[in-house]
Image (tube, grey):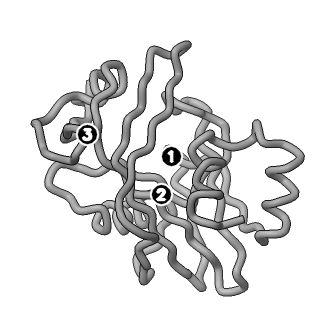
Amino acid sequence: MSEEEEFEIFDAEGRLLGRMPRSRVHAEGHWHKSAHVYLYDDAGRLWMQKRVIDKDICGGLWDYSVGEHLQPGETFLEAAHRGLEEELGVRESALVCLGEPRKGRAEFPELGILDCELQQAFKGVHDGPVTANAAEVEEMRAVTLAELERWVSARPADFTPWFLRDLEVYGIL
């Protein structure tokens, strides 16, 4: 039996309070950190990832190129690079920060989950292939922003709620 992942937890101002198992962090609504990556190919298409169906939150929905919880002691940028390598097999990508870290909150009462994150988003370009890690990613798709806009308009339920929110927050669409 594998040991449960531990997250650092923070107060609402981002001050470290300690560590806690992932399940308790999500059940009790503690602030924790995550990095999000919008990865584009050299033609300007955004790589989208479909989350594996057995994810604890929003399984089977389309999401950022990479969304990664930070490991204890890790920076947002380190987590973004780790996520790119673990989930997509991308080892080299220059990432640009999309503003200051911000708070994101999503509630899933039917699952007993209150997800409170201190989030940092990044944008990058990768001109090579991506190789989805089947344990994390069901499918990858590169879409133009025009295609994404039509898709989101026609079928918003295909996407995670935080992805839909952040399309506006970061001016992606």
Question: Real-space Cα distance between discs 1 and 2?
Answer: 6 Å
Residue most extreme to the front? 13
- Residue topped by disc 3: 12
Residue 104: horizontal and vertical position, in percent?
Answer: 44, 43
Identify which residue is drawn at 38% across, 53% down.
102
Of residue 60 and residue 25, the one placed in the foreground of this image is 25
State whether residue 84 is above or below residue 69. Answer: below
Going by the numbered disc 2, the residue's amino acid type is: Glu
Of residue 10 and residue 49, the one placed in the foreground of this image is 10
Question: Real-space Cα distance between discs 3 and 2?
Answer: 29 Å
Going by the numbered disc 1, the residue's amino acid type is: Glu
Question: Real-space Cα distance between discs 1 and 3?
Answer: 29 Å
Residue 94: horizontal and vertical position, in percent?
Answer: 42, 83
The disc, 1 or 2, on the residue closer to the chain's N-terminal end is 2
Residue 87 image label: 2
State whether residue 85 is above or below residue 69. Answer: below
- Mark 1 and 2 residues: CB-CB less than 8 Å, in contact? yes
Going by the numbered disc 3, the residue's amino acid type is: Ala
- Residue topped by disc 1: 136
Residue 119: horizontal and vertical position, in percent?
Answer: 38, 53
Count of labels in the image? 3
Residue 165 shown left or right of residue 113 in the figure: right
